[in-house]
Each structure stands twice: as structure tokens, then as C-alpha cells.
Image (tube, rainbow, N blue to C red):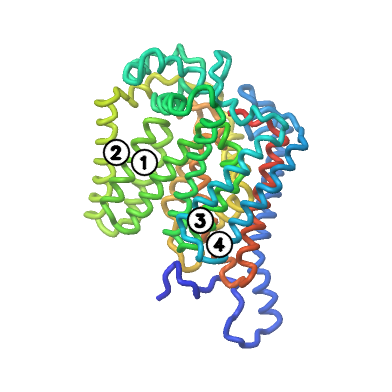
Amino acid sequence: MPTPSSPGVSFPGASPSDGDSVPPHDRAAGSRRRRWPIFAMAGTAAALLGWFAYGQIRPPIPFGFFSHPPLYGIWAPTIDPLALLVVPAALLLASVGWLTTASRRVPTWLTLVLVIAAGLCVAAMGELVRGDWHHLTRDLSTSNASPHYAADLNFVEEYGVRGFAERRPDLTDDFRSYHSKTHPAGALILLHALFKLFGAGHPLRIATVVAGIGLLAAVAAWSMGAALGGERAGRIAAVLFVAAPGPLMLAYTSMDVVFATVLAGAGALFMIAIHRSSAAMAAAGGVVLALGTLLTFATAFLALAAAITIAIQAPDGRSRLRLLGAATAGGLATLALAWVALGLDVVSAWLSAPQSGHPYDPYWIIANPAAVLIYAGLPIAALGIAGLVRRPSQSRRPVLILVLCVVMLVWGSLPSEVTDLRPGEVERTWAFLYPMLAAVAGVVVDRWTRDAGRWRGPTVAALVILAVAQTVLLHSLWDNLA
């Protein structure tokens, strides 16, 4: 029986390879089936544009920068001649995607290095679309008026790492940045370490490191894609993730990409643990998830999704207990060590976070996933969702990713009185979904292009160009606040 990575496995709509004659109506039907991803992306684009149009005629959102919902940011359409710099960077990324997915001659490790490096180039050039190179580093401003994490680094400097961690719950009201108020101490401690390592006088270096960490989620996308559908599917997943508008637009402007990389890494470990029934992998996933909990409380969603998935997919009760026990032990041990060694108390930080009391608005039931899909870009949005709804041939079911998406949809539909979260901005805070949807989309594209011959690489390159073009469009319409 062929495995997910077998080169000769066919997929729905593949052309016959045995040389038999095919009736004209069968050829026409096969051609339509081969073109369905194009129709899916076109339909997704139409639906998202329709929802965006509705958002412009509904009552205004009374908080934050939502003048043109569902995306968060200042609506200020403009484009600078510097935007032309995106063209060679996009062609570089497209060429890397073509080369590394058309053939396996390039080793996997080199493929990932090339993909991430090219992605960094595109992300940097993308920040110049509006003509202001300061967009590359504005998230690192330590000014008292800055809304970013860096505005509160003085607290870490004043109290030291352990002293700050222990005082974190009591400092909530003193923080200048809303981000600092709503996240554990680890986020500021990590940023403080980067400032010390690379120097406060070199913000571009720090921003590039942050962006690089964010794009490292390509490794998780590859890992999950390969686990679901084989090596080529994993490579396509990595390329699609790095080309997506969300990762590119947030790389230099948001710490959410760092959190997303950690969560995606934990998700990849859990997926492999479930498929292999490996307690060691489950424990490693628990450790990485606990490290993520020192940075963001969003790890709770993945923990819940992983537990549900283990309950669904583990073959028997003993396997369920073994995997859940290993993951729990790894996570709790890591949190306990962080508390003993550094004084990091995530429970106290959670209890001290400000509560949100915004009135319930059913608009967000659809607006939240719509915002994520817009930032995901059409290749990941359309083909990732398609792969969740219908499993591609000869691939594993992406149960963990599907369960996580359902958890996020349900949570995003609840009133803020229940979630203690302000609605919106999920295209940033749910950034960990991008590498996961890319993993599913990678399998779909692999099956779609498997028998495409010389068009295998060009098809991936075309999807890259499409996603980067969307990135430029979004950059030119919204001032992408962090």
C-alpha cells in the first residue's frame, strides 16, 4: 500500500498514465477537477471581499483602530516607489519555492534555510511599501508614548529578571503597553535579553532576529505537512507559510510571530506524538507548550485541542493516558522549574490581567475567522480550509488542526464577559494558525500538482507570487500597527 510520500500516488482529477483513451466528457470532467483549487481561491476571494464590504456599512466599532474592519490598523491607502523592491524579493522566494518543491535534490535543511532567508527579504521589503523604513523597527521603540512591549523594558532593567518576574502581577497597572498588561512576564524578559545581546542601539538587528524567529515556524509547517502528506507536501507547506501575508506583515512589527512559532512547534510535536504514539514526543510537546505559556496565555487553546485530539485518535485508553500523562508531566515540570529558577508565575499573571467589558457583537462570529483568512492569503485560506473539510487522497487526517480551528471559532464567538478578551485583532493573536493551515494546504497542493510534470514547480511559484501580491495590497491599504 502506498504511503503519503509515495511518488506514484494519484489524486482526484489526476490524468491517466496508462495511455488508455479517455472519452471527451471524462477528459472535461477531469480538467474541471484539476482546476478546482483555482475556483476555490476565486470563491474565497469573493466571499472575503463581500464580508469586507459589509463591514464598511455596519455600525462603527467603538474601540481600537477598526475604521475598516475586520482588520486592525489605520486605514491610510498609499504606496511608495520603494514598493518595487518587493518584486525581486518575491521572485527570489518564488524561485526558491520552484526549485525546492519540483525536485528533492536540495536537502531538507537547506530548503528550510533558503525559504526562511528569502522570506526575511520579502518581509523587510514589504515594510517599505509605505515608504517609511522606520516600520521595520517601530515595535522596538522604548519611548514612554510607545504602545509596544519595549516601552516597559525599564521595569526588567530596574528589578532584574527574577525581581521583575516576581513583581509582574503588581506592575500591571504601571505598564504603559497594553500588551505587557495582558501577557506573562516571559515576553518582556525575552525582549530584554535580545536588547542586551544585540544592543539597544541596534534596533534593526533585534527586529531582524524577531522576524527570523517568527519565520522559523516554517520548520513546524514543514514538519506537520510532511507528517500529513509526505516530504514534498511539507516543503510546499513551508513555502506557502513564508509567502503568506500574515507572517510577512507581522514579522518585523509584532511579537505575536514569536509566540506563534513556539505554539506551532508544540503543535508539530503533538501531531507527531499522536501519529507515532510516542510518549517522548508528547512530553517534548508539553515542554515547548509550557515555554510558550511563559510568553502568552494562548497556549491554553492548543493544550485543549491536543487533549481532545489524543482522546479521539489514540488507539486505546492506555495510549491516551500515556500520551496525556507525558505531555502534562513535561509541561508542569517546565512551569515548576521556571517558577523556582526565575520566579515566573503564570497563574498570578493571568489573574492580574485586565478584563474586557465590551458589549457582545455577533459580527465577530464571522469577522474573526474572516480576518485570519485575509491575513492567511488565498492559497492557505482556500486550500487549507478545503483540506480540513475533505482529506486529500493518501494523506493523514489533520485532526489536531481541525480541532484547534473549531476551538478558536467557538472561543471567538463568545462574549468578552466570558473570555476576558477584547474582540478583534485575531489576525495577530491567532497567528499560530498560519503554519498549521499551511501544512494542510501543502498536502492539497502536493496532490493537486503531483502529476503536473514540469508544471509542479511553476505552480508553487505562482501561488507564492499571488500571496506576496496580497501582502503588498494589504500593506498599501492599512498602516499595520503592532
Residue 319 visible within the image: yes
Q: Which of marks 1 and 4 is nearer the N terminus?
A: 4
Give percent across and percent down for residue 289: 36, 39
Q: Nearer the viewer, mark 4 or mark 3?
A: 3
Q: What residue is disc 4 on?
A: 101
Q: Distance between the residues labelled 1 and 2?
A: 10 Å
Asked if 155 appears above or below 436 in the picture, the reply is: above
Task: Identify the amino acid type marked 4.
Answer: Thr
Q: What residue is disc 2 on?
A: 331
Asked if 104 appears above or below 417 in the picture, the reply is: below
Q: What residue is disc 1 on?
A: 303
**Numbered label attached to residue 321:** none
Task: Identify the amino acid type marked 3.
Answer: Thr
Which residue lies most toward the bottom here? Answer: 20
Secondary structure of residue under mark 4:
helix
Task: Identify the amino acid type marked 1.
Answer: Ala
**Numbered label attached to residue 111:** 3
- Viewer-proximal residue among 342 and 292: 342
The structure residue drawn at horizontal position 74% and vertical position 42%, both measured from the top left corner, is 84
Q: Nearer the viewer, mark 2 or mark 4?
A: 4
Q: Earlier in the sequence, mark 1 or mark 2?
A: 1
Q: In this view, does 50 lie to the left or right of 231?
A: right
Decide: marks 1, 2 in contact (CB < 8 A)?
yes
- Viewer-proximal residue among 256 and 117: 117
Q: Which of marks 1 and 4 is in front?
A: 4
Give percent across and percent down for residue 379: 61, 53
Q: Earlier in the sequence, mark 4 or mark 3?
A: 4
Q: Which of marks 2 and 3 is in front?
A: 3
